[in-house]
Amino acid sequence: MTILAIESSCDETAAAVLVGAEVRSEVVHSQAIHARFGGVVPEIASRAHAEQLVPTVRAALAKAGVDRAELVAATAGPGLVGAVLVGLSFGKSLALGWGVPFYAINHLEGHLLSASLEPTAPAFPFLSLVISGGHTTLYLAHHVGKYEILAETEDDAVGEAYDKVARVCGLGYPGGPQVDVLAQRGNPAVLKLPMPRPSSAPTNWSFSGIKSAVRQAVERDPHLAPADIAASFQATVARYLVDRVTHFAAINGVSRVAVGGGAAANSAIRARLQQTGLEVFLPPKSRCTDNAAMIGNVARLHHECGFAPSALTTSARPRWPVGQA
Ligand code: KG4
Ligand code: ZN
């Protein structure tokens, strides 16, 4: 089955063509325009998606050597509602025009299952750590469509904390990849940062305290080297995240752990996970950040499991807990 998948929930306009689990083409257009504003501007994102979507989809079809698909999938949320709407409306129109089924896909489920697109897909059940610009959640994936939340952030998401620390270090947006690179040259022992235990559920995460501790340290000592700040922050975040993952792996008796989401491209988080002795499933870095192949992958799995296609009246959802209809 040939699947055309579209992703437009934030600042990446992306399209991919899959045949089964094989990705035949992938095109991702990242909207560089937001860098000058230090973050994603929703209205600009929607307009840029409207400009880029048709050429992006055309390029994906051409690269795959096809002119239509047998199933169309598009992200229907969560995300910036105006941005989601662009890809979702176009996806629905294409499905209607081609007379093929349409699947409205949850962006988070895309990240959650992205390791399942690789040749070494994890068998169910497995833990999936989704760490992106807006989400930080550890799921227990029982099977396709059934996910249990084990832990989540009570404030900032990991990617968001990275972007804020990047600003403190004088770096641009998106900051995560830049902090990651800078951290390679720094000493992680320079700053002692807290690893908070949120009171509502002590095994949840809280990143705002770590981020504020970084800011306060810089205010106290403006001569701190940005590389040392980056390295200390990165080492703390990686240890904090992975401690919780190993805890939940042990209490659930699950040894397989997948990751997804932009911050899953982080070198320290990947390295630390690989030191746990757990069976770790790391998608390539390009499939951690937003892409359409992960959306096509969820559609493929839903279709294989006999899930019904979505109605063409499906609307864009700014919030959408993963696993809910
Ligand atoms: O999944 P994603 O592309 O978009 C959302 O769904 O949010 O994630 C983007 C986030 C940004 O906050 C970005 O700074 C972060 O992922 N990110 C990273 C790295 N690459 C991207 N954070 C830490 N280290 C990285 N290497
Ligand atoms: Zn994402």
Image (cartoon, rainbow, N blue to C red):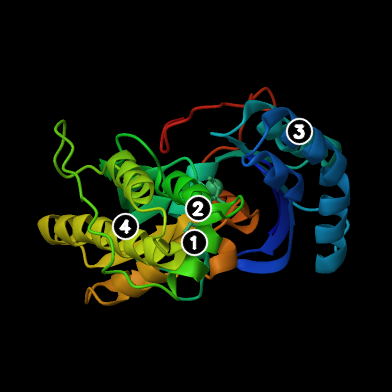
Q: Are marks 1 and 2 in contact (CB under 8 Å)?
A: yes
Task: Report which residue position mark 3 lands on.
Answer: 44
Lower sequence index among marks 1 and 3:
3
Q: Amino acid at mark 4?
A: Val
Q: Amino acid at mark 3?
A: Ile
What distance separates the C-alpha of mark 3 from that of mark 4? 31 Å
Q: Is residue 191 visible?
A: yes
Say whether residue 15 is left or right of residue 163.
right
* 284 up-or-down from 35: above or below: below
Q: Nearer the viewer, mark 4 or mark 2?
A: 2
Q: Is mark 1 within 8 Å of ligand 1?
A: yes
Specify whether tag 2 is near ligand 1 (CB below 8 Å): yes
Q: Are the two marked residues, 4 and 2, in contact with CB atoms closer than 8 angstroms?
A: no
- Compared to residue 221, the image places residue 266 above or below, namely below
Residue 237's disc is 4
Q: Which of the two labelled residues, at mark 1 and mark 4, occupies the earlier sequence position?
A: 1
Q: CA distance from mark 2 to mark 3?
A: 22 Å
Residue at horizontal 86 percent and vertical 37 percent from the top:
97
